[in-house]
């Protein structure tokens, strides 16, 4: 399966539509810092709770999704340092409107998580009240982008957004030499096959730690406190978790259990 070869053309079509970002509010005051929220919680383990309606890699895993308001109410616990929100329409059924609703309801920093390929997405993220935007290293290394990732990062910062740079494979880490990010992340999931690749992700996390890329998030593939403990041991500062939270009957307690798995762990 080549998920990216399906997603990127679909994203180009979505973002090019005249209706993209329609109905979003005017840009608001400077949002809270995503980086600072991760740093404040890093010693105990920062949890980034992701709002998503669908998980393409695990069809049926979520069931009937909560509304944004229900999700925020269910995850309003001290262990949740910040939020992430899927803004992707194709395959994920998300939208910039979901980001706006989450930012408004939570009051915490929100990551605009999307396959960012166009400056219009940066504008949408800013108007939605996001604190940060996700840029994916693989989109540059595999030449999916119409402009360098560094240029997208510069435009994001000019718009008042922080940048989260996502890696998957160790070879992608060299991009950090030319693109300074506010937060770094390693996605356990391969975006082409949608398979979890914990061993490859572990090598990438170790490489990021050696390079001093901080704060550092482990992203995806966390279904239990044991999964979280494995990431904490590798030295991440925080964990982004989506599907497991979405399917949990008690997502706040589940988030707390992931943070509790940090106690006593020495990277």
Image (tube, rainbow, N blue to C red):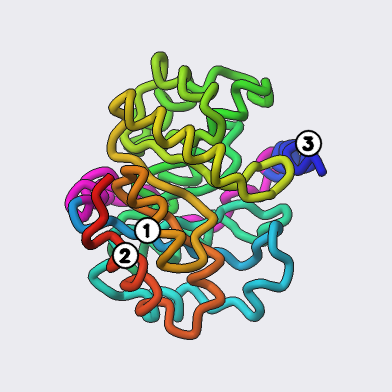
At mark 3, the secondary structure is: helix
Query: Within 10 Å of the Cα at label 1, are there few (<14), some (14-19), or many (20+) other Cα atoms?
Result: many
Asked if residue 38 is among those painted magenta in the image, a careful observer would answer yes
Percent from the top left, x then y, of residue 158?
35, 28
Magenta-drawn stretch contains 185: no
Task: Give me the disc on residue 229.
Answer: 1
**Residue 241 vertical placement versus 105 (above, below):** above
Q: Identify which residue, 109 or 231, lies in the foreground.
A: 231
Q: Is residue 24 left or right of residue 239?
A: right
- Whether tag 2 and tag 1 are in contact, CB under 8 A, the answer is yes
**Residue under the image location 21 percent in, 55 percent down:** 41
The residue mark sitting in front, 1 or 3, is 1
Q: What residue sits right under mark 2 in the picture?
A: 261
SS for callout 1: helix
Q: Report the span colored magenta.
A: 15-42
Where is 194 relative to 208, above or below?
A: below
Distance from label 3 to label 2 (Cα)? 37 Å
Dominant secondary structure of the residues highlighted in magenta in the image: loop
Relative to residue 58, is residue 135 drawn left or right?
Answer: left
Question: Where does residue 175 sit, x and y in percent of width and height?
Answer: 47, 19
Residue at 61% x, 32% y: name it. Answer: 117
| Residue 165 in view (yes/no) | yes
Which image quadrant: the C terminus?
Answer: top left
Q: Which of disc 2 and disc 3 is earlier in sequence?
A: 3
Residue, disc 3: 5
Answer few, some or many: residues within 10 Å of disc 2's Cα (few below 14, many 20 plus, some between 14 and 19). many
Q: Nearer the viewer, residue 44 or 105?
A: 44
Q: Quarter of the image holding residue 63?
A: bottom right
- The residue lying at 73 percent from left, 67 percent from top is 59
Establish if 133 lies above or below 129.
above
What x and y, as percent, mark residue 77?
28, 74
């Amino acid at each position: 399966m080549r998920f990216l070869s399906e997603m990127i053309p679909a994203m180009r079509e979505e973002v090019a539509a005249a209706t993209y970002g329609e109905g979003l509010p005017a840009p608001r005051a400077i949002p809270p810092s995503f980086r600072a929220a991760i740093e404040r919680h890093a010693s105990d383990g920062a949890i980034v709770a992701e709002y998503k309606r669908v998980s393409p890699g695990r069809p049926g895993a979520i069931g009937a999704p909560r509304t944004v308001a229900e999700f925020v109410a269910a995850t309003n616990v001290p262990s949740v340092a910040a939020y992430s929100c899927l803004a992707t329409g194709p395959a994920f059924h998300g939208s910039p409107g979901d980001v706006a609703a989450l930012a408004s309801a939570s009051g915490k920093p929100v990551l605009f998580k999307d396959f960012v390929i166009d400056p219009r997405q940066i504008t949408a993220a800013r108007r939605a009240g996001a604190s940060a935007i996700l840029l994916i290293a693989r989109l540059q290394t595999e030449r999916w982008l119409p402009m360098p990732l560094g240029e997208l990062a510069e435009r994001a910062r000019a718009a008042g957004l922080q940048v989260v740079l996502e890696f998957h494979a160790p070879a992608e880490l060299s991009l950090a030499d030319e693109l300074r990010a506010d937060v770094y992340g390693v996605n356990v999931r391969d975006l082409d096959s949608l398979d979890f690749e914990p061993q490859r992700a572990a090598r990438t996390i170790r490489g990021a730690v050696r390079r001093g890329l901080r704060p550092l998030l482990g992203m995806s593939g966390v279904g239990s406190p044991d999964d979280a403990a494995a990431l904490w041991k590798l030295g991440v500062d925080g964990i982004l978790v989506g599907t497991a939270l979405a399917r949990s009957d008690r997502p706040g307690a589940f988030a707390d259990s992931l943070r509790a798995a940090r106690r006593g762990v020495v990277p």
